[in-house]
Structure formats: structure tokens, C-alpha cells
Image (cartoon, helix red, strand yellow):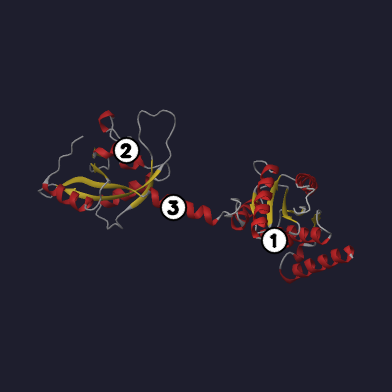
Amino acid sequence: MEMQFSHAEGRVLHGLIEDASGDIVVRLDSAGFIVHASENASELGMDLSSLLLMPHIADLAEAGHGPDVARYVAQVFAGTPQAGWIEFPLRMLDTHEQDGPANPLWYAFSLRQIEDDDGAPQGALGLLRSVQQRHSLEGEINTRALTDPLTGLANRHAFFGQLRRSISAYDEQAMAVLAVDRLRSIFMQYGQRTADEIQWGFAKFLETMTVPGQELAQLDGERFAVLLPGMSIKQARGWAEEVLETFAGLTVTSSKRSPELTASAGLARVEVTVDWTMRQAELGLVMARAGGGMQIGMCGQPPRAVASGAKVELAMEQAVLRAANRRS
């Protein structure tokens, strides 16, 4: 579709598209409806010649973003000073596609009001500029910030967020903290590469032992955590026993040059706070390891009055001492 511009429009257009190669140019009427678009608008599936009713520029935005775009356009027409650009995910307008909406792409939009040679308002000219690469990069950075680089699992920060949201979501819920026994000794004897391979293998094993709805994450270089929604402590113990027995069976080796691998687990109810739940589960793991490993530890339920601060630390220390004494 060929676009014709007055001299005043041409001056505005020049200011808009200077150094803007590849941007999509649109002209709006005074109500914000698209009346012209540059040829490269076909990249968005925008074929104005096939439309009986012209779309409003806000119709290009994904659901939830249209009102922001409409407000931005209204402010431009009202002469309100603008920051310059508004960003929103663009809804592809392929009128021939009937299989549902396409994935949104992020665009920045800039709009300037235009007047004819006599100074009368004649709508506005705008630019749509792709910012998808930047948004994709930001999304990738955010994903990496919440993902363990070795195993690809959610990391501690992501797990804590999920645990916080889950505390009041179920009437009954448990969590487990699991770790390969004596991993530090394996590292000292066989090196970092072997330790990394064991961590990666244990992560993949735990993925096979969880089902959708059970959140698996890596807390640090040694420990993993699993949220078990809808499970009582008794049910969680049965799940953990199956995990440890299966892992031990899979790692049996007759080679003296390969390390013997076992694992331990600590269990806790998901309740009170994130810190409280994590302390209980990690204390359970400490108790399991203090008992020789290849065990499941659970911290007894102390009074709610010791749910924070120094009293919890004291309770944990006493429990560890009791476990060590039993072992000796």
C-alpha cells in the first residue's frame, strides 16, 4: 500500500525514521485507528487491504497491554509530554491463521501528532521497533539467575520462592532435602570432575523419581530439595525410602576404583515459614548423616515458641549432639 504525505507530515516522518531502518511506520487517524502502514508491516500479518474495519493501534497489543497503549495514544493527541516510547508484546495479526494466537513479540512504539500545512490536526505518525532481542536476553538472564548451571534445575532462590507460595496452598505438604553421602570425600579422592558428574547424575535420577507438581531444585553444590504437595510426613517417608533404595541399587558396583554411592534425606512438614521449614528439613538431613548415612532423618516437632532465633539454633545443636551420642 503506497503512502502519501504532506510536507508537514514529511517533516514529522523524517524525524521519526532517521536511523530507523527496519522499523514499521504506521499512520493513525485522530481516534487512534491505523489508516496506513509501511510495506514491512506484512511481517506482522498486517494486510490492511483485506480488512473491512481498520484496527486500533491498541488492538495490536497482547491482552492486558491494550489499555496502556490506548492511554499512551490519548496522551499524545492531548499534547501531554511523553517519555518517547512505550513497549508492549505485539499480537500477530495474520488474518489467515485460524489455529490460535501466535507467540507475542515485543515492540517499542513511538508516536507523534501531525498537522496539515494549515496547522489542522491530521492524526499521528508512529514507529514500531522490534525490541525482541533485548527482551529475550533479559528473559535468558532471569532464567539463568534462577537455574543451577551444572544440573539445569531451579536453584535455591527459585525454590525459596516456590516454597513461600506453597506454605498455605495445601492442608498437608512435606518437603525433602537429599544429598549424596560423603561427596566431599569423593571430591578429595577423585577430583571435581567426578564430583560434578555425580551431582549431575543424581539430579537426573531425582527428576525420574518426581512427578508433575513436585518441585525439584538444587540448593547448593551438594543438596537437593523436593516439595511434596499433598503428602503427609508418613507418605513422604515412604517416597524417600523408595528414592534411597532405588539409588543404592542403581549405583552398586564391583569395581574398587569406583566410589560407592549412597544418599541420605531429611524430611519436614511445610509450615510456619520458609526458614522454619528449611531448618527442620536440613536438620533431618544432618541427623541422617550423623547416623551413618543412607538414612532418613526427621526432626521432632518442637513447640511453636522456639520457631525462630537462638532457641531454634540451640534445639538444632542439641538434636545433633543426641544423634552423635547414639551413634557412638
CA gap, disc 3 and disc 1: 35 Å
Q: Is residue 267 above or below residue 312?
A: above
Residue 196, given in percent of the width and then of the height, sits at 64, 55
Disc 2 marks a residue whose amino acid type is Glu
Q: Which residue is mark 1?
A: 187
Please state, as top left, top right, bottom left or bottom right, where the C terminus lies in the image: bottom right
Q: Is residue 211 above or below residue 267?
A: above
Residue 201, given in percent of the width and then of the height, sits at 67, 49
CA gap, disc 2 and disc 3: 22 Å
**Badge 3 vs badge 1, beta-carbon distance below 8 Å:** no
Q: Which mark is residue 137?
A: 3
Farthest residue, direction bottom: 310
Q: Give the structural element (helix, strand or loop) at label 2.
A: helix
Mark 2 vs 1, N-terminal side: 2
Mark 3 vs 1, N-terminal side: 3
Disc 1 marks a residue whose amino acid type is Phe
Residue 35, given in percent of the width and then of the height, sits at 23, 38
Disc 3 marks a residue whose amino acid type is Leu
Q: Give the structural element (helix, strand or loop) at label 3.
A: helix
Is disc 1 surrounded by few (<14), some (14 to 19) or many (20+) residues within 10 Å? some
Mark 2 vs 3, N-terminal side: 2
Q: Give the structural element (helix, strand or loop) at label 1.
A: helix
CA gap, disc 2 and disc 1: 54 Å
**Is 134 on the left-hand or right-hand side of 112?**
right
Q: Which mark is residue 59?
A: none
Please state, as top left, top right, bottom left or bottom right, where the N terminus lies in the image: top left
Residue 323, given in percent of the width and then of the height, sits at 85, 63
Q: Which residue is mark 2?
A: 43
Q: Is residue 131 above or below residue 46?
A: below
| Disc number lying in front (3 or 1) | 1
Kindly tell me whether residue 129 is visible in this rendering: yes
